[in-house]
Image (cartoon, rainbow, N blue to C red):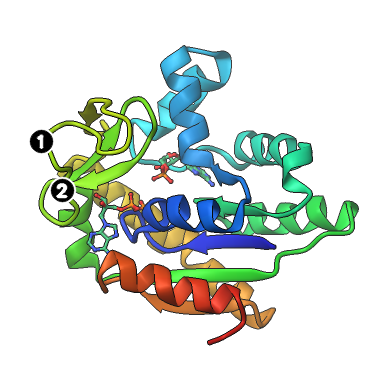
Amino acid sequence: MNVIFMGPPGAGKGTQAERIVSEFGIPHISTGDAFRSAMSQGTPLGVEAKKFVDQGLLVPDEITIGIVRDRLAHDDCKRGFLLDGFPRTISQAEALDEILSASGRGIDHVINLTVDRGLLLARLTGRRICKSCGSTYHVLFNQPKAEGVCDKCGGSLYQRSDDTEEKVGTRLDEYVSKTAPLLAFYSEQGKLREVDGEQEIEAVTGQIDSLLRGQA
Ligand code: ADP
Ligand code: AMP
């Protein structure tokens, strides 16, 4: 099963991806995570990506597409994969179709999580992430049992440097101008399914699960 999660920053893609990949046993491919990991290691990719990520701008297509092309060639993607945060431009979507069709594959489902822009700011500025395992929390909406500590692994929680009010504005503008047009691209292919991302986390997971199992 080859799946894409779409939706603006803060819609809940990462939160839902954690749950869905553990249920379906497929790898979670997040280009945002790939950039953050390269940035923290200071690799050439990380140094280049940082120039854009720190400003809330999209990283250029040629860099981003290369990462996904390499990742999709790994054996663990043969049984399927969940793309989170990719594609984010029409060029990325076209490149993805080419990469997959060259190996006889295609996208099965595109799930679009919808959340009102006003709520996204609160979601993003309150987001906290585990340094060790990457699990996502929220200071109000999805609190860990002990403040600043990951429930799953005991790691400490941090705030992403691009989850500030100023950067969130730029990121949402990037989404509207460059990523939202992709919804029509996948709708025309008959693959787009909408899920109300403002529901409780469990309810969103339940709906995605039903869609992926073809029961909705
Ligand atoms: P994305 O990966 O789409 O940017 P995240 O999954 O990181 O979004 O979610 C953004 C923030 O909103 C996180 O702090 C997360 O805990 C919180 N969140 C995610 N889904 C929900 C939900 N359904 N209700 C309330 N808060 C949520
Ligand atoms: P995310 O973790 O998905 O919120 O992504 C964090 C940042 O990484 C974005 O604001 C972009 O700077 C960069 N990024 C992630 N995915 C992509 C992509 N598909 N195309 C371009 N830039 C991306």
52 or 111, which is in the foreground? 111
- Image quarter for residue 104? bottom right
Q: Secondary structure at mark 1?
A: loop
Rendered view: 15 above or below 70: below
Which disc is residue 183 wearing? none
User: Are the residues tagged 2 and 1 within 8 Å (C-beta)?
Assistant: yes
Estimate the x, y position of residue 38 in percent, counting from the top left: 50, 22
Q: How many numbered discs sit on the rendered protein?
A: 2
Residue holding disc 1: 147
Query: Label 1 amino acid?
Result: Glu
**Is residue 109 shown left or right of residue 38?**
right
Query: Label 2 amino acid?
Result: Gln
Rendered view: 208 above or below 104: below
Rendered view: 182 above or below 102: below
Rendered view: 67 above or below 42: below
Residue holding disc 2: 143
**Is residue 138 shown left or right of residue 20?**
left
At horizontal 50% and vertical 71% (from top left) the residue drawn is 209
112 or 20, which is in the foreground? 20
Q: CA distance from mark 2 to mark 1?
A: 8 Å
Q: Secondary structure at mark 2?
A: loop
Estimate the x, y position of residue 99 in percent, counting from the top left: 80, 50
Estimate the x, y position of residue 120 in percent, counting from the top left: 23, 60
At horizontal 25% and vertical 70% (from top left) the residue drawn is 200
